[in-house]
Image (spheres, rainbow, N blue to C red):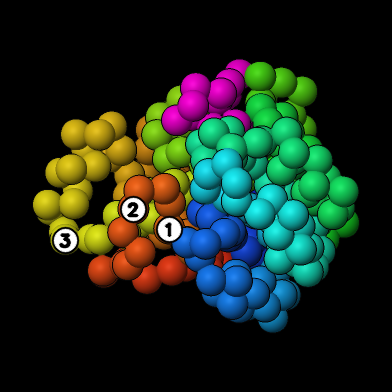
Amino acid sequence: LHVKGLDPVHDGVRIGQLSDIHIGANTPDGRVISAVDAINDAHVDVVALTGDYVTRPGDPLERVPELLGRLRGDVVAVFGNHDHWTDVKTIRRSLDKTGFCTLRNENTTLSVRGKPFTILGIDDGVTRHADVAQTFKGAHAGSRLVLAHAPPTADKLPPGAGLACLSGHTHGGQVFLGALTEGIFLRAGQPYIRGRYDVNGNTLYVSRGLGFGRGSPLLRIGSEPEVTIVTLRAA
């Protein structure tokens, strides 16, 4: 993904993304363990988690830090609609205790390759917790990456800013039947389903995620689970 204003030292920085993990009965622990291993084996510079760690009240919240806590390096997380519908405060506390940086309409600046690298974490838009203006307050200039669970949040980013935004939520359609699935999602207000999009002068990447959400069939057709490795390049 090409990023405007990227510090030359960050050209080639690699981001590992996991999304829509849905820890609990719907997603085998082995799939999550394998995904964590894949991220660790890739030796990325930063790990981005883009929400929906569980699915419903009663899911094993304690398994979230247990399964994800083995991620190595700088880990930054935002939250999804299912986290808000379940217990976002408890999930956030558990991830914070694990040593992750969790963001809800906030930004943080890491030292990556010895230079400032800012991550802007926008809260979930499905549950109407997203506040883009608040997220950008006081944000360091230069190298930036946006995390937002719901892909349409990209429509609210500053136009023409040349930002890169990582999202999830859609499971890549989960049962992807081409134009039929695209039409259904579009009518539901989700024009961005999977992969890369140019949105008002910014770049959005939508992960297919790992698991299965509430009410969804426990199968994937044309939408395999995804571990994402993104390389950032200067625009």
Q: Is residue 135 magenta-colored? A: no
In space, the residues marked 3 and 2 are separated at their CA atoms by: 15 Å
- Identify whether 127 is placed above or below 195: above
Residue 177 marker: 3
Residue 212 marker: 1
In space, the residues marked 3 and 1 are separated at their CA atoms by: 17 Å
Q: Which residues are magenta?
A: 121-133
Around disc 3, counting alpha carbons within 10 Å, would you say few (fewer than 14), some (14 to 19), or many (20 or more)? few
Q: Nearer the viewer, mark 3 or mark 1?
A: 1
Q: Based on the displayed image, in which of its 4 quarters is residue 83 positioned?
A: top right
Q: Is disc 2 placed on a helix, strand or loop?
A: loop
Q: Based on the displayed image, in which of its 4 quarters is residue 63 positioned?
A: bottom right
Q: Is residue 132 magenta-colored? A: yes
Coordinates of residue 12 in the picture (x, y in percent) = 64, 65
Residue 216 marker: 2
* Residue type indicated by callout 3: Leu
* Residue type indicated by callout 2: Ser
Coordinates of residue 143 in the picture (x, y in percent) = 69, 45
Around disc 1, counting alpha carbons within 10 Å, would you say few (fewer than 14), some (14 to 19), or many (20 or more)? many
Q: Residue furthest front?
A: 58
The reply, left or right, for residue 165 in relation to residue 206 is right
Q: Is disc 1 placed on a helix, strand or loop?
A: loop
CB atoms at circles 1 and 2 under 8 Å apart? yes
Residue at the (54%, 34%) spot, across then down: 85
* Residue type indicated by callout 1: Phe
